[in-house]
Image: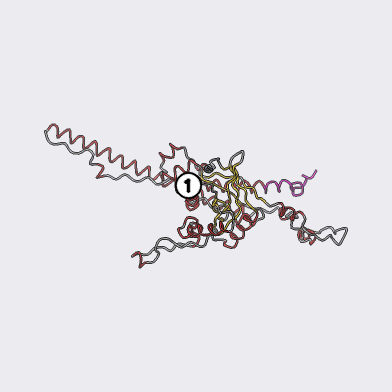
Amino acid sequence: MAEAAVPNTAPMREVQIEALVVMRVIKHSTSAFPTPATGCLLGMDIPTNSGTQLQITNCFPFPAAAPDQPSTQQETGYYQQPTDAATLAAGAPRAKSNVAYQNEMIKYLREVNVDAQNVGWYISTSMGNFVNTNFIENQFFYQKAADEKTVALVFDVSRSAAGSLSLKAYRLSPSFMASYREGKFSTENLQKSNLRYQDILVELPIQIHNSHLLTSYLHDLPQAPPKQTALDFPSSLADLSHDPYISSNPLAPNLDHLDLSIDPFLEKTCDLLLDSIEAHQTEQNNAQYYQRSLAREQTKITAWQAKRKQENQLRVQQKQPLLDENEWQKLFKLPQEPSRLESLLVGRQVEQYARQVDGFSAVVSGKMFGARGNLLPGEAQ
């Protein structure tokens, strides 16, 4: 009698993506920019000695999701603000229409003997701005199953357009999953669980895989030999970058990295970092306003209870029935504490921008120190 398959419970350690999947994600993201592009990832989880390796072998894009709620005034009786395309695209992975479309596509792919295990989803972003409520809800939708093995791929279109591929794989941490499942993000619950903004996402290392045949083809790309045995010395950097003998080779190094100008992506990231800090300050002000409102109400309640006790003491002396000392619950209403989830997400987004600024500054600083001897007089000795 055949034994039942044992589910793979080893923790996920790394993600391996086929190069064809990366090209499909890039093509879909660049064509849909600036609207976020989302899609489904297919593959399998392979147990290894160090844990589980998630192999992503196929993908397909999600269609534009339609709003689930009625949006016309005749159906609801009042006017509702129409949902923009960016919000619909960001919420596409968990939309009801796309869930049915995804199951149907997986069924068709299984019939043609293609890897049909759902292993996550992907989304495109700009300037590293992806830590928001939609991203958390989408990943929680995939990761809430007991035996799931899913990841969220984040492709940064703006950063990749500068010449370096920006592709990251994330999962929600177990501690954040437990807190999000309960839906309690008050100050008391966060102190008990010791949940910080650094504990929201867990980044997994990514490996891009090519078949041996494709790797051999890349190393054997045909290239005609140069007609001249000795090349002329270039007069400028522009002549060097437009040299036909260099630009015709697809594997030639990118000479744009020699540019000493400050990356404009760094300036834009600093602006977004300041905006995120302002948003975090707004969340802090909301929390402080709640604390002040709560303190005022508690002061009123304490004064009312002291007055009621004095009245009851007087009634005892006069042998009259006592008044209810818990009547304050009907007279006073304590303010409701706002959720600290948005504050955690803004803090994580600030950290994301800070990491990007750190990486860009390191590259620019290295170029400047490398050219320092030629830029400053007297430093070339």
Residue 287 visible at all: no
The residue under label 1 is which amino acid type?
Ala
Rendered location of residue 292, percent (x, y)? 36, 43
The residue closer to the viewer here, 322 or 192, is 192
The residue closer to the viewer here, 16 or 361, is 16
Residue 334 in the figure: left or right of residue 20: left
Task: Give the residue furthest to the bottom.
Answer: 74
Rendered location of residue 121, percent (x, y)? 54, 53
Q: How many numbered discs sit on the rendered protein?
A: 1
Residue 29 visible at all: yes
Rendered location of residue 111, percent (x, y)? 56, 58
Instruction: Examine the structure image and report whether residue 372 is included in the region drawn in magenta.
Output: yes
Instruction: Examine the structure image and report whether residue 354 is included in the region drawn in magenta.
Output: no
Query: Which residue is found at the position 56% from the left and 54% from the top?
Result: 116
Q: Is residue 179 above or below residue 75?
A: above
Overall secondary structure of the magenta section: helix
Q: Count residues near mark 1 (Cα–Cα under 10 Å), then give few for <14, some for 14-19, many for 20+.
A: few
Q: What residue is pinned by disc 1?
A: 145
Colour scheme in the image?
secondary structure
Secondary structure, mark 1, is loop
Rendered location of residue 177, percent (x, y)? 47, 44
Task: Give the residue furthest to the front.
Answer: 1
What is the quadrant of residue 235 in the picture?
Answer: bottom right
Q: Which residues are magenta?
A: 363-381
Q: Quadrant of the C terminus?
A: top right
